[in-house]
Image (spheres, helix red, strand yellow):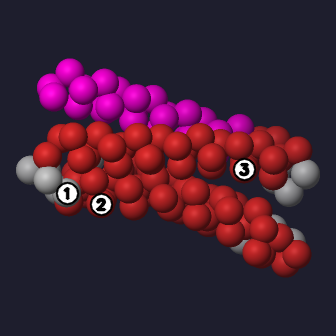
């Protein structure tokens, strides 16, 4: 079984999480327990679920955790949009990180399709 570190989608999701942490570092203190926490939790949930799913037995379990990661990616996508609309991040910052989310979601969709075809 492949180590989760070797999964390209995990690597991209980890990069996304690092970008979100850097981005939210400049959020107002009033958002510390609001949008800052929500964005950090939803983004870090993506690679965490991939790691946990990879550590479980079989493709069925892994597919379930990939599906959860997809939900977290979609949640991250919304929270980024909200942060942009609240003027907490600049449109160009939003565009860059939103592209990372889209790439991760595409990779997750392809992985889920492969796991379902193999199973």
Q: Residue at x 90, y 52 (%)?
A: 87
**Residues at marks 1 and 2 touching, judged by CB atoms closer than 8 Å:** yes
Question: At which x and y percent is residue 98?
Answer: 65, 39
Label 3 element class: helix
Q: Which residue is mark 3?
A: 79
C-alpha distance separating marks 2 and 3: 24 Å
Pair 1/3: label in front: 1
Numbered badge on residue 34: none
From the viewer's perspective, is residue 65 above or below residue 37?
A: above
Mark 2 neighbour density, 10 Å: few (under 14) some (14–19) many (20 or more): some
Q: What span is colored magenta in the figure?
A: 94-119
- The answer to whether residue 22 is visible is no
**Residues at marks 1 and 3 touching, judged by CB atoms closer than 8 Å:** no
Identify the image quadrant of the C terminus.
top left
Q: Residue at x 58, y 64 (%)?
A: 41
Q: Residue at x 83, y 70 (%)?
A: 31
**Residue 51, image quadrant:** bottom left
Q: Residue at x 31, y 32 (%)?
A: 111
Label 2 element class: helix
């Amino acid at each position: 079984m492949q180590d989760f570190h070797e999964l390209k989608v995990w690597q991209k999701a980890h990069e996304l999480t690092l970008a979100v942490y850097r981005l939210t570092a400049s959020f107002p203190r009033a958002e510390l327990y609001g949008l800052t926490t929500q964005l950090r939790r939803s983004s870090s949930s993506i690679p965490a679920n991939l790691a946990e799913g990879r550590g479980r037995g079989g493709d069925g379990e892994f597919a379930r955790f990939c599906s959860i990661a997809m939900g977290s990616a979609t949640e991250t996508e919304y929270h980024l949009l909200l942060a942009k609309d609240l003027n907490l991040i600049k449109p160009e910052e939003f565009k860059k990180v939103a592209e990372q989310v889209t790439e991760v979601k595409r990779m997750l969709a392809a992985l889920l399709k492969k796991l379902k075809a193999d199973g």
